Structures are given as structure tokens and as C-alpha cells.
Image: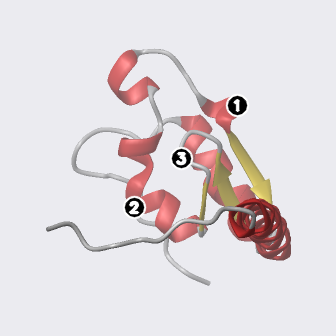
């Protein structure tokens, strides 16, 4: 079992942060932050919580922006994003085929 590294020197880690970290770690999940649309392992979250958790800076909690998810959900989400972007690119390329344009280097 790993030792948790809660900030012992600069004050106490908020209970919401500790609870989220422990829940994700115990369930072998990742933490998705809607604010930056990234997934964090529990350890990454623990190392970066001061930058992500707004209450530390603003006094208002943004804990509802964090979602604990299975790592496979992260892969599935990214695959869906890639497929959506690829579909958009293919549609754009199809439109582009109809144009009769020559591209020349600027002089």
C-alpha cells in the first residue's frame, strides 16, 4: 500500500480533495477534470490539486467539476473525440475537392 503525501507542511489538504483522491485510488480509477478536460491518475491529482481545486484560490469549491472514472472511460472518450474530429476533417476535405485553386508560395 502506498503512503499518501498530503501537504503536511503548508496546511491541511481540504477534505473534499482527500476524499476524491482516496475514492479514486481505492477503486483504481482516474479523476476527470471538466475544467481542462483532462484525466489525472490519483497521484497526478494529488500533486496538482492546488492548481485544479479553486477553493484554494477563490474560496469557492469547484469539486463538482471532478468526476471519478474508470481509465477505460478515458480511452473511450478520446476515441469518440478522435472519430468526431476525423469526421469533420473528412467533410472539410470533401468540400475542398470541389475547389479549383492553385496554391503558390508568396513572393
* Residue located at (78% from left, 69% from top): 90
Is residue 34 placed above or below 23 in the rendered structure?
Answer: above
The secondary element bearing badge 1 is classed as helix
In the displayed structure, does residue 52 sit left or right of residue 67? left
> Would you place residue 32 above or below residue 75 in this image?
above
Q: Are marks 1 and 3 in contact (CB under 8 Å)?
A: no
Q: Is residue 7 visible?
A: yes
Q: Nearer the viewer, mark 2 or mark 3?
A: 3
For residue 29, say whether it is visible.
Answer: no
- Viewer-nearest of discs 1 and 3: 3
Q: Which residue is mark 3?
A: 36
Distance of label 1 from label 3 (alpha carbons): 13 Å
Estimate the x, y position of residue 45 in percent, counting from the top left: 51, 59
The residue depicted at 70 percent of the width and 31 percent of the height is 64
Give the quarter of the image for residue 52: top left
The residue wearing badge 2 is: 47
Q: Position of residue 35 (x, y in %)?
A: 56, 39
Precedes in sequence: disc 2 or disc 3: 3
Label 2 vs label 1: CA separation? Answer: 19 Å
Secondary structure of the residue carrying numbered label 3: loop
Q: Secondary structure at mark 2?
A: helix
Position of the N terminus, as image quadrant, is: bottom right
Amino acid at each position: 500500500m502506498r503512503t499518501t503525501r498530503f501537504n503536511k507542511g503548508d496546511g491541511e489538504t481540504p477534505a473534499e480533495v482527500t476524499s476524491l483522491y482516496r475514492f479514486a485510488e481505492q477503486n483504481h480509477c482516474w479523476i476527470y477534470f471538466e475544467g481542462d478536460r483532462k484525466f489525472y491518475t490519483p497521484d497526478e491529482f494529488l500533486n496538482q490539486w492546488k492548481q485544479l481545486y479553486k477553493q484554494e484560490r477563490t474560496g469557492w469549491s469547484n469539486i463538482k467539476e471532478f468526476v471519478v472514472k474508470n481509465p477505460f472511460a478515458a480511452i473511450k472518450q478520446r476515441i469518440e473525440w478522435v472519430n468526431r474530429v476525423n469526421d469533420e476533417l473528412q467533410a472539410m476535405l470533401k468540400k475542398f475537392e470541389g475547389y479549383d485553386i492553385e496554391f503558390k508560395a508568396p513572393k
